[in-house]
Image (cartoon, rainbow, N blue to C red):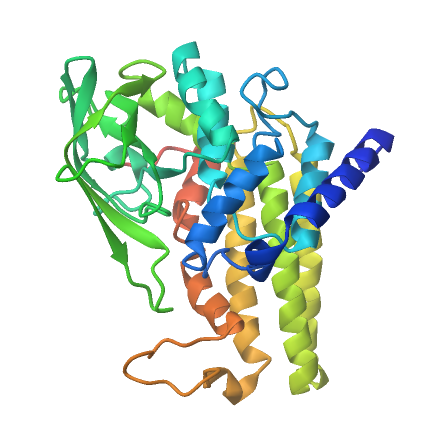
């Protein structure tokens, strides 16, 4: 594979580095490397301000397929988007709270929204002023998105949404939520669904309940809708499944490469722990660590191979299967290389603070969910079997 950065890419890299050196200071620098999966609760207010800092520099929306500056963003080529992701990780910038709006909703509005919706929402996302969450998963449906039971009925120019969503990241901080709901009660499964935009500030109509995880943190939430107003429908009523599938297909490419940069940093931490604990003398552990390194390289090259590719129905599922299992095995290795000391917290536990964990312990506990959230491994294998290999559909 020939994947090289040209002169324009390197000039872009120099510009990004200069910007970080002048803006990643003070409270932002204190949150360096924090706020990612497993620690998304840290510094929410500072990280929200950081979104506005990024927006002021025009760095939000690099991957939007629209005219440069149309919504207050700059536009970068695929290689420049990779450069930005690499420099973001190199600088140790805080975990993003605006990634759902930038990487999922933004491209969806450009592809399926109307001009009014694009003008209303894209500039606010590009400025880092409005945050979004995703209302897909529901209780009793698991990864079966078409099995949702949230309904929406027309009310004037909008819809009233009633139902429950679960595992909703950033619901407590988000200003808006894009919600998949059934708008035609006569239809079933993937027909009769609509993709709705719902403002979260609706007291008495929307309730957010954090879900306390075994790591002691609460990155995910339950969200209850009781007649909440949804003033916007993306793609037209009844087109929700098509819009939702288009959005899920965008969870690959550059965003996958960004994720892998974080994985590489976590692997380096696990290797450092293995050196400190003397675990490298164990040939089995040594082989497992080398395998993790090699598999991460394979994931990177696979992501680069599919970068910008369209029409590959299996690519998102393959990527999810690869990184979900890999990250979970890394969490297990993080404990294995430390032996019995992995059970000891960084400070003495107390009734007041029973969940004081270090970074590698949080990694282990959080990664237990990697093969479930974002579509379970079983669902991904069904998608590959049915849509790529053409095997008979599973009876539902």
Quarter of the picture holding the N terminus: top right
Q: Nearer the viewer, residue 312 or 159?
A: 159
Q: Is residue 274 visible to the viewer in this orientation of the structure?
A: yes
Residue 259 x, y percent position in the rendering: 58, 49
186, above or below 315, in the image = above
- Left or right side of 147 for 68: right
Residue 267 or residue 284, whichever sits in front: 267
- Residue 258 image position (x, y, % from top left): 61, 45
Residue at (55% x, 57% y) in the render: 27
In percent of the image, x 33 and y 79: which residue is there?
A: 354
Residue 330 figure quarter:
bottom right
**Is residue 285 visible in this depiction of the protein?**
no
Q: State the residue in front, 183 or 384.
A: 183
Is 183 in front, or is 322?
183
Q: Quadrant of the C terminus?
A: top left
Count the labels in the image.
Answer: 0
Q: Residue at x 65, y 41 (%)?
A: 303
Q: Using the image, determine if residue 48 lies above or below residue 156.
A: below
Residue drawn where x is 58% and y is 39% of the image: 54
| Image position, residue 34 (x, y; %) | 53, 59
Q: Quadrant of residue 4?
A: top right
């Amino acid at each position: 594979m020939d994947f090289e950065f040209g002169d324009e890419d390197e000039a872009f890299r120099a510009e990004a580095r200069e910007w970080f050196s002048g803006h990643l200071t003070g409270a932002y620098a204190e949150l360096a490397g924090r706020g990612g999966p497993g620690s998304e609760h840290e510094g929410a207010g500072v990280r929200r301000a950081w979104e506005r800092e990024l927006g002021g520099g025009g760095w939000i929306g690099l991957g939007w397929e629209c005219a440069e500056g149309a919504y207050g963003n700059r536009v970068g080529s695929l290689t420049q988007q990779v450069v930005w992701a690499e420099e973001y990780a190199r600088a140790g910038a805080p975990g993003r709270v605006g990634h759902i709006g930038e990487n999922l909703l933004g491209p969806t509005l450009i592809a399926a929204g109307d001009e009014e919706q694009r003008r209303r929402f894209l500039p606010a996302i590009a400025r880092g002023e409005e945050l979004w969450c995703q209302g897909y998963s529901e209780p009793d449906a698991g990864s079966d998105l078409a099995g949702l039971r949230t309904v929406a009925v027309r009310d004037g120019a909008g819809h009233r949404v009633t139902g429950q969503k679960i595992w909703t990241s950033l619901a407590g901080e988000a200003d808006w939520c894009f919600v998949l709901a059934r708008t035609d009660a006569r239809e079933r499964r993937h027909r009769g669904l609509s993709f709705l935009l719902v403002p979260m500030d609706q007291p008495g109509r929307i309730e957010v309940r954090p879900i306390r995880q075994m790591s002691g943190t609460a990155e995910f939430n339950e969200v209850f809708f009781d007649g909440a107003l949804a003033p916007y429908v993306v793609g037209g009523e009844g087109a929700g499944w098509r819009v939702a599938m288009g959005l899920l297909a965008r969870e690959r490419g550059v965003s996958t490469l960004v994720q892998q940069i974080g994985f590489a940093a976590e692997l380096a931490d696990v290797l450092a722990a293995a050196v400190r604990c003397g675990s490298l003398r164990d040939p089995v552990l040594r082989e497992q660590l080398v395998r993790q390194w090699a598999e991460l390289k394979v994931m990177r090259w696979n992501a680069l191979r599919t970068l910008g590719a369209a029409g590959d129905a299996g690519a998102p599922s393959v990527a999810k299967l690869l990184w979900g299992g890999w990250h979970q095995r890394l969490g297990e290795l993080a404990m294995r290389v430390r032996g019995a000391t992995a059970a000891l917290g960084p400070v003495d536990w107390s009734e007041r603070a029973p969940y004081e964990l270090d970074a590698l312990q949080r990694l282990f506990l959080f990664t237990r969910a990697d093969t479930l959230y974002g579509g379970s491994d079983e669902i991904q294998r069904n998608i590959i079997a049915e849509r790529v290999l053409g095997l008979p559909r599973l009876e539902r």
